[in-house]
Amino acid sequence: MSDSSAPSTLSDDALWEKLRTGDKQALGLLAERHYRALFHYGTKLTTNHALIQDCIQDLFLTVWEKQQTIPALHSVKAYLFVSLRNNVLRQVKQNGTSTDVDSDLVATDWLANPETLYVQAEHEQSLHESLRQALERLPKRQREAIYLRYYENLSYEEIATAMGLSRQVVANYLQHALHNLRDHWQDLSYALFLLSFLL
């Protein structure tokens, strides 16, 4: 029986299997579905936006070229993240540039729609600035783990795969990061909510 599901409604796993059989539309849908998240993740590794775009393009080109040999995956998203991370860091190393994140590039998406938060603008701005400063005080790897966990909603196992670490190390990073944030935020649950806008 043929799969009657519309391609755009298929899961990542289903699209990946179609890709492995030579379905170029599946590749395009995966790229469209994950491009924004991959690009945003790339900005945590380098401030060179052109390099990030090139690395994402190279990532999907490589996937297409190796469609017949790429394996089935437990997590397509984790695979894409770890592949982009490797691509970016390899290019950064070759270019001799830094991977430190510029604090000016920490997105404050909430400011893009001032009408929505007009009444509480000053209060919200103060809260975001306080949280941004708390995040900047975290070690870079802790910030990365926080981003993957609370912005991209990756599991511990997926974060471990993306960062090239063990699950226990990821758990330790997140525990230490949350402990540090808790020192600055009594209401940690609200701080984690703000992360989805600030990271």
Image (cartoon, grey):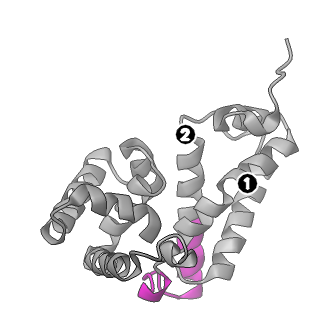
Quarter of the picture holding the N terminus: top right
* Residue 53 visible to an observer of this rendering: yes
* Nearer to the camera, 49 or 109: 109
Report which quarter residue 120 is drawn in: bottom left
* Nearer to the camera, 19 or 117: 117
Which kind of residue does numbered mark 2 sit on? Answer: Ser
Report which quarter residue 101 is drawn in: bottom left
Q: In the structure shown, which secondary structural element does the residue marked by tag 2 occupy?
A: loop
Residue density around tag 1, few if under 14, some if 14–19, many if 20 or more, within 10 Å: some
Question: Residue 199: image x %, image y %?
Answer: 44, 69
2 vs 138: above or below: above
* Residue 199 visible to an observer of this rendering: no
User: What's the magenta bit mostly, secondary-structure-wise?
Assistant: helix
Question: Residue 6: image x %, image y %?
Answer: 82, 32
In the shown orientation, is residue 185 left or right of residue 156?
left
* Nearer to the camera, 132 or 156: 132
Q: What residue span does the magenta drawing correspond to?
A: 86-105
Which kind of residue does numbered mark 1 sit on? Answer: Ala
Q: Is residue 87 magenta?
A: yes
Q: Is residue 38 magenta?
A: no
Question: Residue 126: image x %, image y %?
Answer: 31, 81
Q: In the structure shown, which secondary structural element does the residue marked by tag 1 occupy?
A: helix
Residue placed under numbered mark 1 in the picture: 31
Residue 75, label in figure: 2
- Residue at 53 percent across and 66 percent down: it is 41
Q: Give how far apart the Cα atoms at labels 2 and 1 are.
A: 15 Å
- Residue at 64 percent across and 62 percent down: it is 36
- First in sequence: mark 2 or mark 1? 1
Residue density around tag 2, few if under 14, some if 14–19, many if 20 or more, within 10 Å: some
